[in-house]
Image: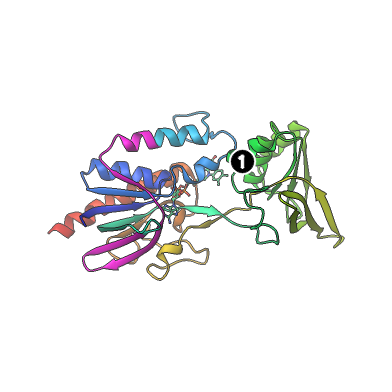
Amino acid sequence: MSVYDLIIIGGGPAGITAGIYAARQKLNTLLITKDFGGQVARKAVVIENYPGFEEISGMELIKKFEKHLRKQKVDIERDEVTKLKKIKNGFLVLTKSKNRFESKAVIIASGAAPRPLEVPGEKKFIGRGVSYCTICDGPLFSNKIVAAIGGGNAGFEAAIFLSNIAKKIYILEYGPKVGADQTNQERVKKTGKVEVITNAALKQIKGQKFVNSIIYQDRNSKKNITLPLEGVFVEIGSQPATAFVKGLVDFNKKDEIKINLRTNQTKISGLFAAGDITEIKDKQIVIAAGEGAKAALSAYDYLQKFQD
Ligand SMILES: Cc1cc2nc3c(=O)[nH]c(=O)nc-3n(C[C@H](O)[C@H](O)[C@H](O)COP(=O)(O)OP(=O)(O)OC[C@H]3O[C@@H](n4cnc5c(N)ncnc54)[C@H](O)[C@@H]3O)c2cc1C
């Protein structure tokens, strides 16, 4: 087995940028990722805060990222990392397809995955009415009644996207008021198709072969209310994708990896982390990309010393 200088785990903004920077430092690099785009590919409305592009869709932006990466000398594996181990002089990476890779340094850039609702019916109806990706699955709900669960920006943006497809959209928010910003609230209002329900605790997703209704509890009256509908879009935030690295690094209370904020190194020499997987305060594309660049340059510095 050949030993890479650097293995990058993740193909979102942080991992891709790390790959581009590593290649420019002539590091022998492997990038392993389940998919390209990560959370950016789930973005339901256009991105308006990535410099250089006043308006660009998530898919378009990530295609540009991927194209840029593929122009570099970086090996790419489409696979899921299941375990990362510290071994003598480096790291061993194990994947779902039973591949094993070794490297002298690693950058973890596995970002975050959608947080599940954890209500009865959710798992049963995944792909049969329950979706975690509005942009991917939304078009299947033409002229149907659907719900976006979560009253933050993600829930509102999902509703805006769905308003061009579905007949009616409910937004269910657990708290007494929604968290979406004013612009998104105004855009939702303009669609004329969205009903926002606050103080709604989702209790169950029901159906036969496919979803046909949800039950939520009105947290004021404590009454259970049934809404007949066919699609449930889960938009209640994300959780760090850290399963493969448990026991190896330190985490904060949110399960985010603790790093040296200047170098992106974890408590283990040669093991770096970048982007939404880490404890950095703001989770944004431009920040994740910057953190990926920082981590790659720190890995390069580490490897220079490693050779000595
Ligand atoms: C709905 C939504 C809307 C958003 N809108 C905006 C916006 O308008 N502007 C903005 O700046 N930011 C926005 N964000 C935030 C932004 O998308 C993230 O901050 C950014 O994508 C983080 O990049 P990342 O590379 O750290 O992680 P991610 O984008 O999460 O990428 C992680 C990558 O790692 C891969 N991966 C995970 N686990 C493994 C594993 N075990 N093995 C191999 N690969 C793995 C994933 O497949 C993915 O490719 C939005 C996020 C969401 C969810």
Check the image and report above or below for 97 versus 182.
below
Where does the N terminus fall, quadrant-wise?
A: bottom left
| Helix, strand or loop for disc 1 | helix
Residue at the location (48% across, 46% down)? 38
Relative side of 113 to 296, left or right: right
Q: Which residues are magenta?
A: 66-94
Residue 163, image x and y in percent? 71, 34
Q: Which residue is mark 1?
A: 137
Residue shown at 65% from the left, 41% from the top: 158
Q: Is residue 8 above or below residue 63?
A: below
Q: Seen in the image, is 260 located left or right of residue 149?
A: left
Where does the C terminus fall, quadrant-wise?
bottom left
Residue at 43% across, 49% down? 34
Residue 50 in sight from this viewpoint? yes
Q: Tell me the residue at 46%/34% (across/down).
A: 61
Q: Nearer the viewer, residue 144 or 305?
A: 144
Q: Position of residue 100 (x, y in %)?
A: 30, 59
